[in-house]
Image (cartoon, rainbow, N blue to C red):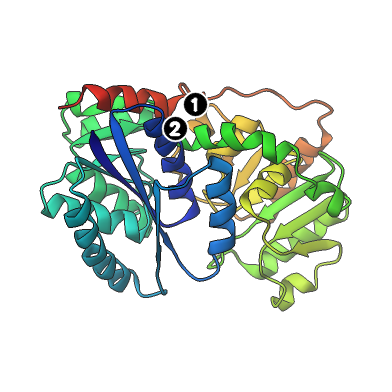
Amino acid sequence: MKKIVLIAQDRAAFLHVAPLVSAFRKNSVFQPVLVRVLTPGSRAEHDKLAAAFGFGDALRVIEAEPDTPVGETASFMLTFEQIFNELAPDFVIPGGHDSASLAGALAAAKMGIPVISLDAGLRSYDRAEASEITRLVIDSVAALHFVSEHSGVYNLINEGFADERILFVGNTAIDSLVTLMAQANASSVLDSLSLAPKKFVTVLLKPESSVNRELFCKVLESLAATTAVLLPGTQSSDEALNSVAGLRMIDMPDYIDMLRLLKESAFVLTDSAEFEAELTVMNVPCLTMRQSTARPSTVELGTNVLIAPDEQEILERASVILSRKKREKTLIPEKWDGAAATRIVEVLERAE
């Protein structure tokens, strides 16, 4: 039986590897172990997601204290060295672009264990993003590259990777979305907030957001004058946001409740790339205040629109979306069908 260690630290990484753990457990070829690194405050959501996927003995949790990116990576490398020595895995699969995924990939490569890259070849071409550097490093040490969209294939070929190492399988995060949507649809979060479907806008800001607060508050105030505007997060101490008339700030919901909020939003305004794929599959317009994206398929085929943090442009696009009586149906990128994990398992069953 082949042993496979899967690694996740942040939520996005967990959602990429969770469907693989489930798929591996359905056959007798693989013995998966998911190593989840938890930082303070993430335990409650982790437990709920782990329960939603029915994980038990395939899960190992590591509690970690926050540190610098370099400190985290160094510490995690030593931890994974011990785990790999104990388990002697045949493959290591980093789930995302976080410090634990990077550390696991580097430790495995140093120990001669084949690394498998998920979401391989994604590039934002913004080297100022830590996740971009992590993507490049993991791809560089990987023995196999499982690609989630066509841009990944083009990027890897242009970077000189051999064609036979590149396999287009789809997006495993969408597998998670398919698994969790029934629970999300049953969520009572809209009732608890007295919100009607498609009658509100959800705004998502990164904790370290660099969006100009004065400009952004003007945008939010204009939006709130015509529709309900919801801002999940922990910005209650932000004096500028607190002064925006009509803005509803709430604690950050767990992932399943968040899926329901996003699905029922008229549109989403954000400076984060976190939900680009899910919003495209749910056919929810997304205005993303960024210059680039690592998932160009969400722009070319889906609902994602990259915009400048410009008041006039945001309000003009918002007005067009809110005035539509019927939402236009966009395309879903190829193989974003909830079966990516199955395709990956089939490939690895044939791997020597």
Q: Amino acid at mark 1?
A: Trp
Asked whether 8 or 337 is in front, the reply is 8
Q: Quadrant of residue 131?
A: bottom left
Residue 302 percent location from the top left of the image: 57, 30
**Of the pair 352 and 253, the residue shown nearer to us:** 352
User: At label 2, which amino acid type do we have?
Assistant: Asn
Query: In what element is the residue under mark 1?
Result: loop
Q: Position of residue 188 (x, y in %)?
A: 80, 46
| Residue that appears at 69% across and 75% down | 238
Query: Which numbered disc flags the more N-terminal residue, 1 or 2?
Result: 2
Q: Is residue 134 above or below residue 323?
A: below
* Residue at point 68%, 64% (across, down): 215
Query: Would residue 209 be visible to someone looking at this image?
Result: yes
Give the image quarter of residue 26. Answer: top left
Vertical comparison of 39 with 9: above or below: below
- Nearest the camera: 317 or 260? 260
* 300 horizontally vs 133: left or right: right
Q: Is residue 204 left or right of residue 170?
A: right
Q: Which mark is residue 318?
A: none
Q: Residue at position x 85%, y 42% from top?
A: 199
Q: Residue at label 2?
A: 171
Q: Judge whether residue 304 can be spotted in this image.
A: no
Q: Quadrant of the N terminus?
A: top left
In the displayed structure image, the side of residue 49 where residue 135 appears, left or right: left
Front-most of residues 57 and 242: 57
Question: Measuring 55% from the left and 55% from the top, which residue is drawn there?
Answer: 47
Q: Are marks 1 and 2 in contact (CB under 8 Å)?
A: yes
Q: Position of residue 349 (x, y in %)?
A: 26, 24
Q: Position of residue 20 (x, y in %)?
A: 40, 35
Label 1 and label 2: CA atoms lie apart by: 6 Å
Residue 336, disc: 1
Which SS class for mark 2? loop
